[in-house]
Amino acid sequence: MTADAEMAADDVVIDDSARCPCGSGDIFGGCCGPLLQGAPASTAERLMRSRFTAFGLRDAAHLVRTWHGSTRPRTVDFEPDMEWRRLVILDRHAGGPFDRDGIVEFEAFWRQGTQRGALHERSRFVREDRQWYYVDGDVS
Ligand SMILES: [Zn+2]
């Protein structure tokens, strides 16, 4: 079995008319859905949201595709019982449609078994060839 086949077996499917997991208040088909299908994100925040959604849906392809080449890991692994529950955007700096870089600070709430917690990160993004990419982030 290839890594891709394992990934596919693990895939979580979500309906286009369901609420988007990123918490934008939009439906999945009008928010992160198209981005996960390969549409470019207009802003760094939208890319950040789609990456949060991709972690929840175990969409490794989207995460790898939107990771900048300078920092991109060869594979993205998911912990099987890790659930990403909620995303809160705390701050953003630049990252607009005409910017070259941007920063998005967020808190992502997770649950794993009986454990709960939150990841707090200030992430850096760059825009190249009209595509936003995640570069890296400071976790605190
Ligand atoms: Zn979304």
Image (cartoon, rainbow, N blue to C red):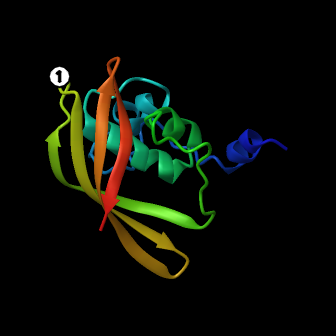
Q: Residue at (57%, 43%) from the top-left corner?
A: 60
Q: In this orientation, which residue lies closer to the viewer: 4 or 57?
A: 4
Q: Which residue lies furthest to the right in this view?
A: 1
45 or 100: nearer the viewer: 100
Front residue of 23 and 97: 97
Above or below for 12 versus 87:
above
Image point 51% across, 82% down: which residue? Answer: 114
Pointer 1: what residue? 98
**What residue is at 72 percent from the left and 39 percent from the top?**
4
Work out which quarter of the rendered image holds the N terminus and state it. top right
Quarter-of-image position of residue 51: top left
Report whether 20 appears left or right of 44.
right
Helix, strand or loop for disc 1? loop
Q: Which quadrant of the rendered structure holds the C terminus?
A: bottom left
User: Is residue 30 left or right of 103 when viewed as pictured?
Assistant: right
Q: Where is residue 110 in the image (x, y as percent from the top left)?
A: 43, 67
Q: Position of residue 135 (x, y in %)?
A: 37, 42
Figure disc tally: 1
